[in-house]
């Protein structure tokens, strides 16, 4: 199913007559199992899919059955019951009932299956569906698997499953899910609770009361203390860390934190000076408990209190956000630019794609490209970077690459290990004519890519669910490209052409195109 950012989700679902559903979803390069009931959604996901669906839960919810709001999933499975599908067969697959998405009566096919009178309908895929002739309409059968395309956005393969088998499967999955886990606690320092302890030229102790909400407090983390010479906290003169004490849900405790930072001794010297102190608890399971990263980012001036507590990053996968910030700063980004770039990455939906590669040191993002290198329009390049990384590993660079001679090259994606500059083009046209019109522009963009000396040019076409190539694999991709007017001579100057479809990545050679 296509979504607003141009990506797509794949569902394998079994829908009951009462709209209860059991199935799996592939999204963001990950996979999740789900159960849909009348008023709730249960989800068990890996990290990548959880980052794409509910990133704020990725810190603690991986591999656990979670309870989510029904609107969490982008598909209303109640629309895919046998009765609703049958009605759509009769009314046309688009609201207008016309055009290439329409189901039309099919001549020459049986009008009775067993004792049931039916009306045969031919679908855009060429398959034939049989719908009961009288209301309430339902699917009575079809020739092989057939695709249902709704508004050009949702493509579904429909098959028959007995109601008894479905009820058994759903009940078994529901029992296996059990109770949803208790969310981990969030910790906050109570305003006005600060107390000063011993404060000398060598060290300074401060405390505050830290309270937990009603979540699980079984894994307490740390607090970070920040001493600054200004009320805004821009000039940090000392930091400290301390373990969070064990408290019960809705409980609280006073926590002492002492700085012995060299910066404190240098700033205070032998004079008495005023300072400001803030205590910031970290909440494991939400934004993580990586004290080193938080202190590093504070020293760079990239963080503020709202961000560290996680509330400012509630929908951005806070732990991954910190990893990206830390990685970009390590690559030479300024604090302000890294902050904006990481925010763009979170907004684009590529946070869970880029963060693991950045953290592993296999992906670099050019500081000269600025935050724009991580905006939503760059999402296809990050997906392709991950695909290549998983296929053969190696070093990848987004936004730009500086070769060994010191010459800087600006572009989208550089596969440094395989010495390729990569142009990625989403195929959004929904017809062969549209595919034919997209091809020349894709080839021109690839040939004009800024390639370092010794680098070849790779063209990657990503078929969206609307594309005629989306459902194809193997030799069918080359045959369809030939039918759209693509010839082998068009690949002159292009090292490799890869088409990414629902079935995987297909390499197309010039000899395959004639």
Image: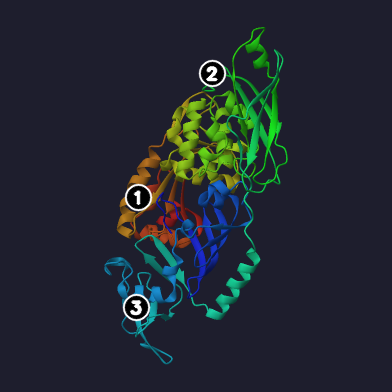
Mark 3 or mark 2: which comes first in sequence? 3
Please name the residue shown 44% across and 30% down the image: 369
Mark in the foreground, 1 or 2: 2
Of 344 and 65, the residue lying toward us: 65
Mark in the foreground, 3 or 1: 3
Name the spot of residue 294 as percent of width and height, x first: 61, 31
> Image height check: is 5 above or below 84?
above
**Residue on which disc 1 sits:** 439
Q: How many marks?
A: 3
Please name the residue shown 68% across and 16% down the image: 262
Mark 3 or mark 1: which comes first in sequence? 3
Tag 3 secondary structure: strand
**Residue on which disc 3 sits:** 121
Disc 1 packing (10 Å; few <14; some 14–19; many ≥20)? some
Q: Are marks 1 and 2 in contact (CB under 8 Å)?
A: no
Name the spot of residue 380 as percent of width and height, x first: 45, 46
Q: Locate residue 499 relative to residue 189 in the image: left or right.
A: left
Q: Are marks 3 and 2 in contact (CB under 8 Å)?
A: no
Please name the residue shown 48% across and 71% down the image: 19
Disc 2 packing (10 Å; few <14; some 14–19; many ≥20)? some
Of 105 and 510, the residue lying toward us: 105
> Image height check: is 353 above or below 114?
above
**Residue on which disc 2 sits:** 230
Please name the residue shown 33% across and 47% down the image: 440
Tag 1 secondary structure: helix
Q: CA distance from mark 3 to mark 1?
A: 33 Å
Residue found at the far top of this picture: 270
């Amino acid at each position: 199913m296509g979504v607003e950012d141009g990506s797509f989700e794949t569902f394998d679902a079994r829908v009951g007559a009462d709209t209860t559903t059991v199935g799996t979803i592939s999204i963001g390069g990950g996979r999740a199992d789900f159960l849909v009931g009348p008023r709730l959604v249960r989800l068990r996901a890996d990290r990548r899919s959880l980052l794409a669906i509910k990133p704020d839960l990725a810190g603690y919810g991986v591999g656990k059955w979670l309870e989510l709001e029904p609107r969490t999933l982008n598909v209303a499975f109640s629309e895919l019951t046998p009765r609703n599908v049958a009605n759509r067969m009769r009314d046309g697959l688009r609201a207008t009932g016309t055009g290439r998405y329409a189901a039309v009566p099919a001549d020459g096919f049986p009008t009775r299956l067993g004792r049931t009178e039916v009306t045969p309908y031919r679908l855009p895929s060429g398959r034939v569906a049989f719908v009961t002739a009288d209301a309430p309409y339902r699917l009575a059968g079809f020739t092989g698997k057939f695709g249902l395309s709704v508004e050009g956005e949702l493509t579904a393969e429909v098959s028959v499953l007995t109601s008894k088998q479905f009820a058994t499967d759903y009940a078994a999955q529901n029992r296996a899910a059990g109770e949803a886990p208790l969310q981990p606690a969030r910790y906050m320092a109570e305003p006005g609770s600060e107390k000063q302890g011993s404060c000398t030229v060598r060290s300074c102790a401060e405390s505050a009361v830290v309270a937990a909400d009603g979540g699980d407090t079984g894994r307490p983390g740390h607090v970070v203390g920040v001493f600054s010479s200004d009320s805004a906290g821009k000039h940090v003169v000392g930091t400290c860390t301390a373990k969070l004490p064990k408290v019960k849900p809705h409980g609280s405790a006073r926590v002492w934190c002492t700085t012995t930072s060299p910066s404190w001794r240098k700033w205070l010297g032998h004079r008495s000076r005023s300072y400001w102190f803030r205590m910031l608890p970290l909440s494991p399971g939400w934004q993580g408990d990586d004290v080193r990263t938080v202190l590093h980012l504070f020293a760079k001036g990239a963080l503020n209190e709202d961000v560290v507590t996680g509330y400012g990053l509630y929908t951005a996968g806070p732990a991954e956000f910190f990893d990206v910030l830390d990685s970009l700063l390590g690559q030479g980004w300024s604090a302000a630019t890294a902050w904006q770039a990481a925010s763009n990455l979170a907004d684009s939906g590529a946070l869970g794609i880029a963060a693991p590669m950045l953290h592993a040191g296999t992906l670099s993002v050019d500081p000269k490209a600025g935050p724009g290198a991580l905006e939503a329009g760059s999402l296809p390049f990050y997906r392709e970077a991950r695909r290549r990384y998983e296929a053969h590993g190696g070093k990848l660079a987004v936004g730009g690459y500086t070769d060994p001679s010191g010459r800087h090259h600006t572009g989208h994606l550089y596969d440094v290990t395989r010495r390729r500059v990569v142009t990625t083009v989403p195929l959004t046209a929904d017809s062969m004519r549209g595919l034919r019109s997209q091809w020349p522009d894709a080839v021109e963009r690839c040939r004009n890519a800024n390639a370092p000396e010794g680098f070849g040019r790779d063209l990657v076409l990503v078929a969206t669910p609307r594309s005629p190539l989306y459902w194809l694999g193997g030799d069918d991709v080359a045959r369809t490209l030939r039918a759209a007017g693509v010839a082998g001579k068009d690949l002159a100057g292009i090292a490799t052409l890869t088409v990414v479809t629902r079935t995987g990545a297909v390499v197309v050679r010039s000899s395959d195109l004639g």
